[in-house]
Image: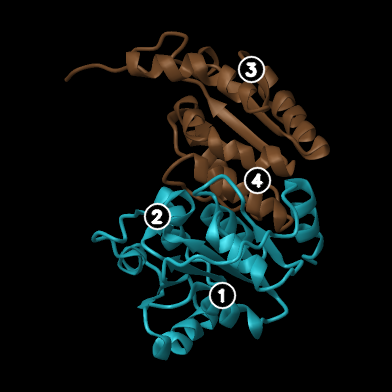
């Protein structure tokens, strides 16, 4: 099992200037915030299940930029149908990294369906994603994360991560207007 | 989200240069999709049936909290001449649910009013950065008829 903030830091440390990042509510937003305050990030703090559709809309509107959605297993499971929509639309510039701790960490660690038998990479593949993989070992992480930069998407990488207590880090603003204005203003 | 009341409009959208159509698996995904599209400096419209308004409720917090303009055209069911009783509860609740989520709502009963009302709703949404919905009434669209073979 991986450490979630190592995964996020590796994804964002050598970041391409045109990469736009969307994070799903809960731990992924705290993780992305902990990696740095960047104007090219938009962090969900609510509306569970909406990060995927938002990232798809952004990718369609900005075909010359790469869009990376970093979200959790619980958030993605709430709106699993979006994988079918993404698979149909085939946005080449969209990649999803799922930080899969197999639990609803924000609400007491109750197990999600991925703790059972649901395989999110297999779901994405069956929906027509171009590249999918699941990574659980540190030794395989670099290769798995390299997939995110493949030119032909859509891409989905499941990173199996520990359910671990981590320092809380808030994103730029809880005020949605301030957050979206800053993010939109950073897009040329 | 395909609906009989929107089928001609969807064909026109498909044929329109510079316009993309995305078919959703559930209506609330259209809320996030259009919000992401606006963040990326494009505009869109969500075409749904009144039953799908119920699916959108919590998602409508996203445009509300971020003041993202969201334009919806809703084909009504469960009212004028309805045959299917299962359509009635959400049809009756549709305007109340939209208003509860701070969506500016206008209803159209006459064909001549559709264009001006949609234009006004679009202006309202994009100029004031709020959500707006146009409800196309079942009286306008015609009640769907069902018959056993």
Is label 1 or label 4 in front?
1
Q: CA distance from mark 3 to mark 2?
A: 45 Å
Q: Residue furthest bottom?
A: A139
Q: Which residue is mark 1?
A: A8
Residue A145's place in the image compared with A107, above or below, is below
Q: Are marks 2 and 4 in contact (CB under 8 Å)?
A: no
Q: Which residue is mark 3?
A: B107
Query: In this image, B5 relative to A124: left or right?
Result: right
Location of residue A32 (image quadrant): bottom right
A21 or A171, nearer to the observer: A171
Image point (47%, 76%), residue name: A3
Q: What letter labels the chain drawn in cyan?
A: A
Where does residue A177 sit, x and y in percent of width and height?
77, 47
Is label 3 or label 1 in front?
1
Q: CA distance from mark 3 to mark 1?
A: 47 Å
Residues at marks 1 and 4 on the same chain: no
């Amino acid at each position: 099992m991986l450490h979630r903030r190592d995964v996020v830091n590796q994804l964002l440390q050598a970041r391409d200037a045109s990469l736009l990042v969307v994070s799903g509510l809960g731990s992924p937003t705290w993780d992305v915030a902990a990696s740095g305050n960047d104007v090219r990030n938009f962090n969900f703090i609510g509306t569970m299940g909406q990060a995927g559709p938002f990232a798809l809309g952004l990718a369609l509107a900005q075909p010359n930029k790469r869009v990376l959605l970093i979200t959790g297993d619980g958030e993605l499971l709430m709106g699993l149908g979006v994988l079918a929509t993404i698979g149909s639309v085939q946005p080449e510039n969209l990649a999803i990294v799922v930080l899969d701790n197999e639990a609803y960490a924000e609400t007491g660690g109750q197990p999600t369906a991925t703790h059972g038998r649901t395989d999110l990479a297999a779901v994405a593949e069956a929906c027509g994603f171009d590249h999918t993989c699941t990574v659980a070992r540190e030794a395989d992480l670099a290769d798995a994360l390299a997939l995110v930069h493949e030119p032909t998407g859509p891409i989905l990488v499941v990173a199996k991560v520990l359910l671990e207590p981590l320092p809380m880090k808030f994103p730029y603003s809880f005020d949605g207007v301030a957050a979206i204005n800053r993010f939109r203003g950073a897009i040329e | 989200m395909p609906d009989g009341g929107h089928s001609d409009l969807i064909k026109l959208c498909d044929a329109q240069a510079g316009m993309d159509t995305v078919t959703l698996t559930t209506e609330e995904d259209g809320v996030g999709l259009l919000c992401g599209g606006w963040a990326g400096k494009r505009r869109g419209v969500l075409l749904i049936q009144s039953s799908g308004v119920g699916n959108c409720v919590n998602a409508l917090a996203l445009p509300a909290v971020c003041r993202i303009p969201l334009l919806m055209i809703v084909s009504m069911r469960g009212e004028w001449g309805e045959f299917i009783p299962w359509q009635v509860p959400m049809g009756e609740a549709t305007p109340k649910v939209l208003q509860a989520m701070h969506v500016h709502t206008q209803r159209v009963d006459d064909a001549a009013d559709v264009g001006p009302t949609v234009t006004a709703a679009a202006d309202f949404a994009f100029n004031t950065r709020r959500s707006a919905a146009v409800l196309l009434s079942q009286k306008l669209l015609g009640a769907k008829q069902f018959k056993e073979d």
